[in-house]
Amino acid sequence: MPAKAKKGGNASKKTEQKKKNKIIEDRTFGLKNKNKSKKVQQHIQSVTKQVMSVDRRTRMEEEKRKQMRKDHKLRKKAEEAERNALFGEALLAVKKKKTTNQKDGKQEAKGRDGNDESAKKGTSRAMKMMYQMDAQEMEDRLKEDPNYVPTLEDEIESERQKKVAELKKSGQGTKVTPESFAAWKEKKRKRRAEEARKKVEAEFKKKKGGKGLAILSGRDLFEYKRELFDKDLEDGAADKQVDDVAAKVQSDLFLEGDDDDLDDLDDD
C-alpha cells in the first residue's frame, strides 16, 4: 500500500523532493554546456537555491502558525485564570447540583452539610451563606431567581435575625417604649454635651482669649452653652419684629384733605 499523506494535506518528503527536481529540470531544460560553462552552472545553482528556499519559507510559515496557536492557548489560559481570580466566588456560587426526582419532577436544592467541616474551609462568603441556609430556603430562593447569589445585605439580615432570636431567648434585650426611648435620648444628649464641653475646654487651653473656638462647629458650641444662641431669633421673632416696624405708618407723612385735592385733579 502506498504511504498515506500526513495530516493536513502535506505530501511526503520524497514526493516533495521529486517535485522540486522536476521544477529544476523544467527551468534548466535546453541549456547548452551545462557541465562546461561557468555561467550556466551559476544559473543552475541559482534556480536550485530558489526552488529549495521555497520549502524553507514554507517551514518557517508553518512554525510561525504553530507559535501563534501556542500563544493563543497561553493567552486563553491567562484570561481564564484572571476571570477565575476576579469572579471565581460568584461562578462557584451559581454552580448548583441539579437532580430531578423521577416521581414528582421536583428540583432538589443544594443544602447545607453540617458535618462536613473540611468542605467549609477556604470557601467564599457566598458559599458560607449557602451553608447557613437550609434546603427549603435555598430551593425557594433559586425558584425566584435561578442566578441567586447571597449578598452582603443577606448576610447582615441573617446575623440580625440571629441576634434578635438570641436576645429573645435569653431575655436580656430591652424593649423599646416611649419611656426607654426618652431615657436613651437624654443619655445620648448628656454624652454629647460632655464631649462638647471637653472639646471647648481643650480649645480654651490651647489658645488664649477663646481664639481656638474658630475650629469648633456650631453644634459643639450649642451643646456646650445653649444660652449663646437666642431661641427667639430661631423661632422667627426677629422676622415678626421687622414686620411690626414696617406695619407702623407715621400719620404725619400725609396731610388731611389730600385725597380731596387728588379728586379735584381728576375732575380737571
Image (spheres, grey):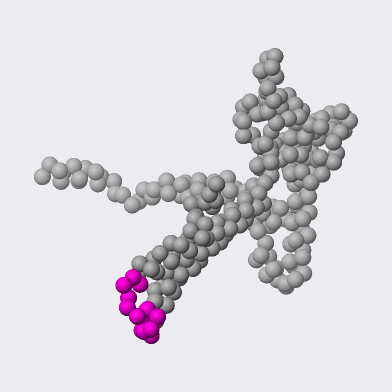
- Pinpoint residue 172: horizontal percent, then vertical percent: 87, 33
Q: Choose between 149 and 83: the one closer to the eye.
A: 83
- Pinpoint residue 207: horizontal percent, then vertical percent: 72, 72
Picture residue at 85% right of the left edge, 41% below the top: 118
Determine the main secondary structure of the stretch shown in magenta.
loop
Residue furthest toward the left? 268
Q: Quadrant of the C terminus?
A: top left
The residue stretch that appears in magenta:
28-40
- Pinpoint residue 203: horizontal percent, then vertical percent: 73, 66
Q: Choose between 100 and 141: the one closer to the eye.
A: 100
Residue 72 part of the magenta-drawn span: no
Q: Choose between 37 and 165: the one closer to the eye.
A: 37
Picture residue at 69% right of the left edge, 17% below the top: 102
Picture residue at 76% right of the left edge, 58% below the top: 197
- Left or right of 237 in this view: 189: right
Picture residue at 75% right of the left edge, 52% below the top: 193
In the rendered image, the vertical position of residue 78 relative to residue 149, given as above or below = below
In the rendered image, the vertical position of residue 104 relative to residue 185, given as above or below = above
- Left or right of 60 in this view: 114: right
